[in-house]
Image: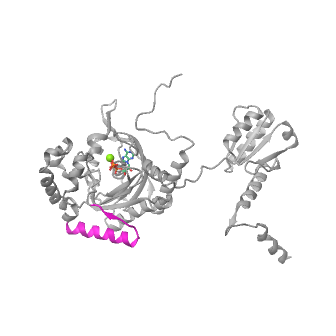
Amino acid sequence: MALITKAIKGTKDVLPAEVYKNQYIEAVCRGVAERFGYKEIRTPVFEHTELFQRGVGDTTDVVQKEMYTFDDKGGRSITLRPEGTAGAARSFLENGLSNEALPQKVYYFTSCYRYEKPQAGRLREFHQFGIECFGATSPLADAEMISLAKQVFDELGVEDLHLELNSIGCPECRAKYQDALREYFGAHKDELCTTCQERLERNPMRLLDCKSPEDKALAEGAPAVLDYLCEDCSDHFEKVKSYLDAMGIEYRINPRIVRGLDYYTKTVFEFVADSIGAQGTVCGGGRYDGLIEELGGQHTPSLGFGMGLERLQLVMEAQNCEFPEAVKPDLFIVALGEKAQKQAVEIAREMRGEGFTVLYDLNERSLRAQMKYADKMNAAFNVVIGDNEVENKSAQLKNMQSGETCDISLTTFMNDFYRISMDEQLKDLEINGEAFDFGSLFGSGLSEEE
Ligand code: ATP
Ligand code: MG
């Protein structure tokens, strides 16, 4: 039978055999975020289109070219989120988090949707780990946010990433800078791509972020924003750098980074990998002091980042980082006949309740077929239960790694299993490179007391 349809271009299935990598990365991100005092927020996958037009900015590539926007059956314009910040900011305002103690620190895992040309590291559905810190003015917050991302990379063992840092100032210093850019690019107007010719008047800083090769080349010679910072922004930037220095976090100043979203002010940064080709930015973020006001709230200086999880995984794979293996099942029960089957389901029920991973065949197949299936399931131990075993209330437990077997009682199965599997684990325990002699713990101590 032919497959009725294929997955949408630019989307990716994560199959059961691979998902442990995603789960591992997510667990590390979550753990780090929580240790920095962040709490998870979950917001809808779609929002009113105007949220992104206002929040992301309607001169950005994301809004102008990349959004999945459609009218729903009620005639409302809806957009699948292209990024996480706008939704989190809307929720922060709508749910009154803005009235709670500030800063409010949230993190999220989101799927994001952008209509882009699919290629390595660029998908139409991709995933981000993101954080937002609403209501924090000090450069301490900028440095802490960057150190959070760095901590994630360190814990995952990612090495080949460098931090690029810039400040794009505030609306005040930016006005002068925009003028300088208009003048510079204006002299080359005919050479610009059509989108940028239109953006030149309204938002010339966008031109620095354009992907077209001609515009990119022109941008190389453009005036640098750092020469235009006002005293306040300049002071803020100096302090961010000095806190990063104090934390031992290395960075390169890159005056070309402006980020793809309109809401950024002051600090912007990217963590860039050299090992995965052109789509090397794994994490990007910065401060967005104007966003909350733009969405109708009080002035609330804030900041955050988005980390592309597919790109992060690409970097880790390119670097041969270790992904802890998916946990193996503890036990596979091969059961033959109805009585044995009932014994098996009861043992499995009890053990699963206590945290063991226990499997048995769901097709009631022959011994041979079950053994074959059990092999594929790769459990640490197997046990075969048939009529004889039920009668004798005893079976043979087999350690699938060593091949050793031992008798195990069916009446006290779980306790016996626990003891036997613990013994196995202790056997493997090494201390200072030597097998640990468990007996030494008790032996002498006990005899002295006697
Ligand atoms: P790029 O310059 O690569 O287009 P961007 O500036 O559009 O990135 P952001 O909007 O800052 O990216 O998103 C944050 C992160 O999300 C990026 O650094 C990247 O890791 C990831 N990301 C963005 N777009 C995609 C995509 N289409 N596919 C996969 N990951 C993506
Ligand atoms: Mg992009």
Q: Position of residue 251 (x, y in %)?
A: 35, 65
Figure quadrant of the C terminus? bottom right
**In the image, is residue 357 above or below residue 231?**
above
- Asked whether the viewer can see residue 41, the reply is no
- Residue at the far bottom: name it: 448
* Count of marks overlaid on the render: 0
Q: Which residues are magenta?
A: 230-254
Q: Nearer the viewer, residue 446 or 134?
A: 446
Whether residue 437 sits left or right of residue 261 in the image: it is: right
Q: Residue at x 20, y 42 (%)?
A: 195
Which quadrant is the N terminus positioned in?
top right
Residue 190 visible? The answer is: yes
Please indicate whether residue 294 sits to the left or right of residue 330 in the image.
left
User: Coloured how?
Assistant: one colour
Position in image of residue 234 (x %, y %): 24, 68
Residue at point 45% right, 49% down?
314
Left-right relation of 106 to 404: left
Residue at 79% from the left image edge and 41% from the top image edge: 384
- The prevailing secondary structure element of the residues shown in magenta is helix
The picture places residue 150, in percent across and down from the top left corner, at 43, 62
* Residue 44 horizontal/vertical position (percent): 40, 43
Up-down relation of residue 71 to residue 230 (above or below): above
Q: Is 105 one of the magenta-colored residues?
A: no
> Is 234 contained in the magenta span?
yes
Q: Is residue 23 above or below residue 435?
A: above
Task: Answer left or right for 139 relative to 25.
Answer: left
Viewer-side residue, 202 vs 303? 202
In which image quadrant can residue 163 be found? bottom left
